[in-house]
Amino acid sequence: MTLARKRHAVYGNDDTGNDYEDTPSPAKARRVDIPATIDNSDPSGSDYDSDNDSEIISTRIEGIYLDTVNRANLDFDFEHICSVSLSTNNVYACLVCGKYYQGRGKQTHAYLHSINDDHHVFVNLQTLKIYVLPDNYEVEERSLNDIKATIRPTFTSAQVERLDLACEHAQDLSGKPYLAGFVGLNRVKRNDYMNVVFQALAHVPPIRDTLLLLSDMDKQTPLVQRLCGLVRKIWHPKLFKAHASPHELVQEVGVRSKRRFRFDIPGDAFDFLTWLLNTLHIDLGGTRKRNSSVVYRTFQGELQITAQPLVDTKSRPNENDPIEIDSHNDSVKVSKTPFLTLSLDLPPKPLFTDDGGDDDDNDDRSTIPQVALVTLLQRYNGSTVAEWKGEARSYKLLTLPRYIICHIRRFSKSGLSIEKNPTVVNYPIRNVPFGDLLPKDTTVLPKDSSATYDLISNICHDGRPEQLPQNPNHHNDGLAQSAVYAADDSSSADGRYLVYTHNLADDKWYMMRDLQVEPIMPQMIFLSDSYIQIWRRNGC
Ligand SMILES: [Zn+2]
């Protein structure tokens, strides 16, 4: 309590519009009145003037107030709403009991709480200013800065630069050790499909660093503000509790997506990732141009599509022969298109596998077909032709992004049910030669052709897929393999997402499943069904 402390009474109208006392006398009188023992215990004697007297007394009272601050009661992860009025406007947290109340003027909920419960120190959750109530004056007290940092962690460039160089071993208030950057996320309800996406993006360095260092938060959209808030908590080395809650963020996702993505209903992690990347791109000022946002700078590559109506392709003596594009026919169309993700098709689900009715099916992986990732990637070699919407198509990669997102198409809709293809995908986790897919005759970015990539995040899905509700509440385009799932009451809803993430600082892998975080051996990654992988170009 010895550090700089500023005190000044604040009078006037509160943001809430509530009227309150506009003369200082009652507040001042109360401030002197409270601890009756102060005068008797004051060792400074009687030889001082009355102004100093009152100053010293109030300073001591303030000290007593500040000593009542109880960090163990504080949790700023909940949505910032007044516990009485449920308003989100002008909300203060009581630093004694942790509850949220609106306003600080006379007759506001915070004011009444200070009198009724004898709790006197409050922080404004928007401005982070700290006030003593009911006296209603601001306190600048450096010993409370850790509380402000917990509400809204901030990072310097120097701190961010160190994140991938050295591990920050931290402890929460209860002494529980944790590794900054590798903390669990609360499962609000069925938001595991969102949590894995938040964790994966929080570990893509250019995305992470942008969110940690973004300034002018008042000018950002609520989605960006809340995503920044979550990523900053994930990487904060001084958490009060060694986990973070995505509560506010998932609420905003529901609002922003017009309830397409809800935290109370299971969803598809890839659909959500795609939506989040596109929304972030726009919110961060992105346009159609390359490199116009950190999302495009990180994940955007370009591919060439060669398409021809199926009727014009080369005739096949046998139906099982591969389709071939007839390049002499004028109906061939060649176009270039940017991409943020590469979708990979698994071989068809074997017929002998039932529809997932038996849990044991998933345990015995030896009977499940396997395929190599490099085989799946041949879809993009420029010569593999596949049928798509009445066309024969081939895809050729032209440029590769710094970070490649691969989407392994496991889920497909069949009537009202979602089917999951259990095929095991095999891959090395280092030095995958994505560059080999680039055409060798190109003059565009020839250095890319030797590009190799390391896996940094692997979003997996364990167990059975959730099932469609009776009345899907939004349209579902089969191309994007969108999945609309049944609500929480589905008894078969035992599928769950998890994510494996690589920590560059200690070169170790971590498994994160909602609140659960565990260091793992790299080979553990292969025990779950890979669904979305993020690869990082070596040397970038
Ligand atoms: Zn309180």
Image: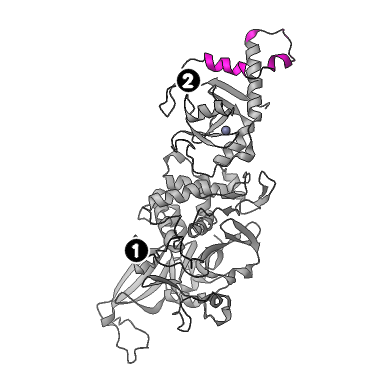
Q: Is residue 7 above or below residue 165?
A: above
Magenta-highlighted residues: 24-50
Instruction: Name the amino acid, label 1.
Output: Asn
Expressed as whole percent of the image width and height from the top left, the position of residue 176 reads 68, 49
The quadrant in which residue 362 appears is bottom right
Q: Is 12 left or right of 529, judged from the image as shown?
A: left
Residue 11 marker: 2
Residue 306 marker: none
> Which of the marked residues, 2 or 1, is nearer the chain's N terminus?
2
Residue 471 marker: 1
Q: Is residue 321 above or below residue 362?
A: below
SS class of the residue under badge 1?
loop
Q: Nearer the viewer, residue 99 or 444?
A: 99
Expressed as whole percent of the image width and height from the top left, the position of residue 95 reads 59, 34
Expressed as whole percent of the image width and height from the top left, the position of residue 371 reads 51, 79
- Residue found 64% across the figure and 35% down from its top: 70
Q: Is residue 509 above or below residue 422?
A: above
Q: Is 31 covered by the magenta stretch?
A: yes
Q: Nearer the viewer, residue 308 or 245?
A: 245
Q: Nearer the viewer, residue 394 or 187?
A: 187
- Residue found 34% across the figure and 63% down from its top: 471
| Quadrant of ligand 1 in image | top right
Q: Nearer the viewer, mark 2 or mark 1?
A: 1
Instruction: Name the amino acid, label 2.
Output: Tyr
Q: Is 421 left or right of 184, judged from the image as shown?
A: left
- Residue found 36% across the figure and 52% down from its top: 258
